[in-house]
Image: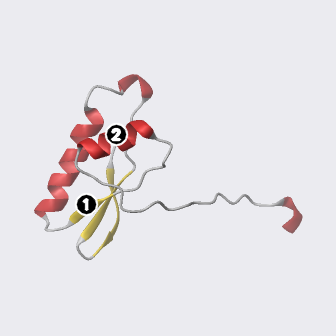
Amino acid sequence: MAGEGLRFPGYSKISAVCMRPEHRGRGYASSLVNVLIEKITEGDETPFLHVGTEIFDAIHLYEKLGFKTRCIINFAIVKESKLWN
């Protein structure tokens, strides 16, 4: 699966690119992302996306499709603490 997420003037985010492990390596993700790139660029927008730095297969795929790393952003996962309840 793949879709569009955040949009702002001139840009549209490709998001939720997911593939079941048993279906990887068959070109499905490339096809889905290419369809979205075409749709977004036909609308005179620039596609962008984000990916975790440890997801090497996805990074390789996106680089093959023409995406380049612009910046690295650190994310933090915050869990609810029982101390505050």
Q: Is residue 83 left or right of residue 9?
A: right
Q: Marks 2 and 1: in contact by CB < 8 Å? A: no
Q: Position of residue 73 (x, y in %)?
A: 50, 62
The quadrant of the image that shows the C terminus is: bottom right
Q: Specify the amino acid type for callout 1.
A: Pro
Foreground disc of the pair 1, 2: 2
Q: Specify the amino acid type for callout 2.
A: His
Along the line of sight, the residue nearer the viewer: 85 or 31? 31
Q: Earlier in the sequence, mark 1 or mark 2?
A: 1
Q: Secondary structure at mark 1?
A: strand
The answer, for residue 85, to whether it is visible in the render is: no
At horizontal 37% and vertical 45% (from top left) the residue drawn is 17
Task: Tell me: residue 16, above or below residue 78.
Answer: above
At horizontal 85% and vertical 68% (from top left) the residue drawn is 84
Task: Tell me: residue 82, above or below residue 20.
Answer: below
The answer, for residue 8, to whether it is visible in the render is: yes
**What is the crowding at mark 2: few (fewer than 14 residues within 10 Å), some, or many (at least 20)?**
few
C-alpha distance separating marks 1 and 2: 17 Å
Query: Colour scheme used in the picture?
Result: secondary structure
At horizontal 15% and vertical 53% (from top left) the residue drawn is 38
Q: Is residue 64 left or right of residue 82?
A: left
Q: Position of residue 18 (x, y in %)?
A: 40, 40
User: What residue did someone put label 1 on?
Assistant: 47
Q: Which quadrant of the view contains residue 45? A: bottom left
Q: Secondary structure at mark 2?
A: helix
Q: Which quadrant of the view contains residue 47? A: bottom left
Considering every residue shown, the one lying at the far left of the view is: 42
User: What residue did someone put label 2 on?
Assistant: 60
At horizontal 20% and vertical 53% (from top left) the residue drawn is 37
Along the line of sight, the residue nearer the viewer: 58 or 70? 70
Q: Which mark is residue 39?
A: none
